[in-house]
Each structure stands twice: as structure tokens, then as C-alpha cells.
Amino acid sequence: MSLSEAALDKPDPLFVLCEARTGSTLLRFLLDAHQDVACPGETNIPVLCHELVNTWSLATGHPSPDRRPPAELPLLPGEVLDGLRASVSLITSAHLGRLGKTWFCDKSLGSAPYAKLLLQLYPQAKFICLYRHPMDVIASGLEACPWGLIGYGFDSYIAASPGNSVLALAHRGAMLPVRA
């Protein structure tokens, strides 16, 4: 059985929609410990799917979504969806085969904006929406970065609130828009 044939036998993936400092790493380890679920570290598959939309659209002669934000993508033609699924399935099936597991789980930070695209690609996908009280996100962020906030997707929030880590984390934890 080829890798692409093996991919057809697998259920649609499980996606953990989460942000930094919400407990997503612990959840990933718990899910990955299941005998059937493979949940690797940050794969950024939702972002990859979004980037591949334009490539597949161009290659198949369909109108390109013009790099729209993922939540504003139109319904994609079946040919584009089939190509995206086949591309991603090569990656996920290789990982599943290596571990002898049957269900792929993606836990990538900042994946929530890609939910509409992921549902188009995988209509039977399951989603876990992980959130944490903003005050706990602030406390966790300050504890994780005692010498200043770096990484975790905080960059734009830090730039908008220079010198005020608590405000930057509050905006991130509450998902408030950043004002430059």
C-alpha cells in the first residue's frame, strides 16, 4: 500500500485551536500518549495549508484568494481541496506510519484563524478549543519570560506596549487588537 493510499484510511485530523500560555503543551503530551493519537510539536500545518491555497489555486488555474486572511477565504474548488489534502496527507501519514498510530493531531499556536480553511479541507475534523483566563495567561507569560517577553507570538503586542509586559500580555490573553 502506498503512502497516499494509506492516507485515505485515516480519519480527518484533530486540531487543537490555542494560543500561547494556555496549557497547550501539556494537552499535546496527554493526547500524544494515547495509543492511536500522534500529536507532534508545533507543525504549523494550518499555516502551511493557508500558504498552499495560493500555490494550488495558481497551479490549477483557479482564481487565487489573493492572500486574504484565513477567516475570509472563499469556498475553495474541489480540485484545490483535493490537492491540499493530498499534500498534507503525505506529511501526516508519514508521521503516523513511523509511530504506528492512526489519528493525527495538530497543536500549533495561533491556529484558530485557520479553522474555516481546516473545515473545508477536513469536513469531519474534530476541534479542541483551548482557552485560559487572561489573568492566568499574564501570570504564565511573566513567569516564562522573567527577563522580558520574547517569542510565543507576543511580538506585535510587545511592540505596541513597549516597557509594559503586563499590558502586552493582557492584550494577547484577551486577543485584543494591537494598535501601533
Image (spheres, grey):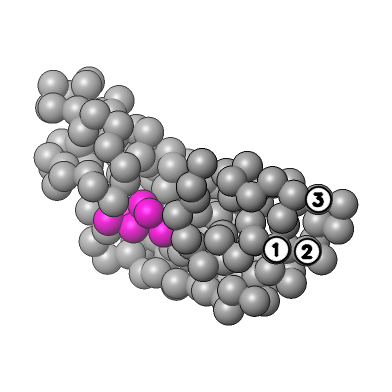
In space, the residues marked 1 and 3 are separated at their CA atoms by 11 Å
Tell me which residue sits at (23%, 53%) in the image.
120
Tell me which residue sits at (63%, 42%) in the image.
159
Q: Which residue is mark 3?
A: 148
As helix, strand or loop, the secondary structure at mark 2 comes to: helix
The amino acid type found where label 2 is placed reads Leu
Location of residue 151 in the rendering, given as x and y in whole percent from the top left corner: 69, 46
Location of residue 176 in the rendering, given as x and y in whole percent from the top left corner: 47, 60
Q: Which residue is mark 1?
A: 166
Q: Are marks 1 and 2 in contact (CB under 8 Å)?
A: yes
Left or right? Give the position of 28 relative to 116. Answer: right
Q: Dot 2, crowdedness within 10 Å: few (<14), some or many (≥20)?
A: some
Q: Which residues are magenta?
A: 112-118
As helix, strand or loop, the secondary structure at mark 1 comes to: helix
As helix, strand or loop, the secondary structure at mark 3 comes to: loop
Left or right? Give the position of 58 relative to 155. Answer: left
Q: Nearer the viewer, residue 1 or 171?
A: 171
Left or right? Give the position of 143 relative to 64. Answer: right
